[in-house]
Amino acid sequence: MLGITDFWTYVLGVVAIILLPGPNSIFVLSVGARRGVRAGYQAACGVFVGDAVLMVLSATGVSSLLGTYPPLFLVLKYAGAAYLAWVGVNIIRGAWHGWRHRGEAAPVAEEAPAEMQRPFRRAAVISLLNPKAILFFVSFFLQFVEPGYPHPAWSFLVLGAVVQFFSALYLTALIFGGRFLAGQFQRRRRLAAGAATGVGALFVGFSIKLATASVS
């Protein structure tokens, strides 16, 4: 079908991969919890755009440059790691700022740190500054594209649409789950500070993982 082999195996693989936690999904959950459904969907759209760009780059063979030109991979790797670390540290700083001012009546949503603002742009950057994601997309997609198919663009389009569809379902669940958490956070300031600190620590961990990743 449209040059795709083992379509349902691909679908099962996509679902399993999307359910694995990563910086994109954690960021969307955090934005949904701290700033509401609208901002959560803005972050989700940033993820969609970032992933779409990565898929296009992978389909056009750009990812092969990362394997054949290691300095390019190193630049992207450390830039992405630095950005994730910066996001994580600022989330932690915002959490402790909220904890110090826990006696004030301002809602948690208004105390969002700077990196929770402009969620679309920040989510897109988190996606784009991840060279391992580019390599993953091309290695995963190519397993399900029929060799010799005369119109491979259609194959990549369908495979990409499947990824975006299940990603939309998953991120929607995270956004509305985040709204439930927001209600809990507004009543429990210690819980809010602890959860935000944990999210920040996850981003720092993602940055360390990316900084130590190899091109293979």
Image (cartoon, helix red, strand yellow):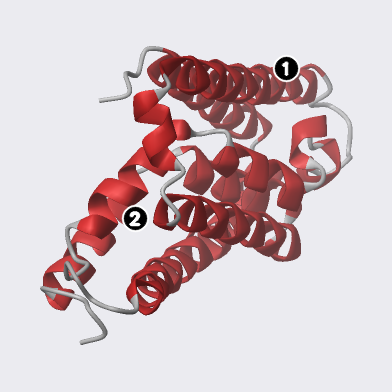
Q: Residues within 10 Å of mark 1 (few under 14, many from 20)?
A: some
Residue wearing tag 1: 93
| Residue at the image point whose x is 79% and y is 19% from the top | 97
Measuring from the top left, give residue 64's x and y in whole percent: 37, 38
Disc 1 is placed on an element classified as: helix
Q: Which mark is residue 44?
A: none
Disc 2 is placed on an element classified as: helix
Kind of residue sitting beneath label 1:
Arg
Q: Quadrant of the N terminus?
A: bottom left
Camera-near label (2 vs 1) is 2
Decide which of 205, 187 is in the foreground and name it: 205
Q: Is residue 199 above or below residue 159?
A: above
Residue wearing tag 2: 18
Q: Quadrant of residue 94?
A: top right
| Residue at the image point whose x is 43% and y is 33% from the top | 65
Q: Can you see residue 17?
A: yes
| Residue at the image point whose x is 34% and y is 79% from the top | 151
| Residue at the image point whose x is 19% and y is 60% from the top | 13
Q: Is residue 201 above or below residue 126?
A: above
Q: Is residue 53 above or below residue 167?
A: above
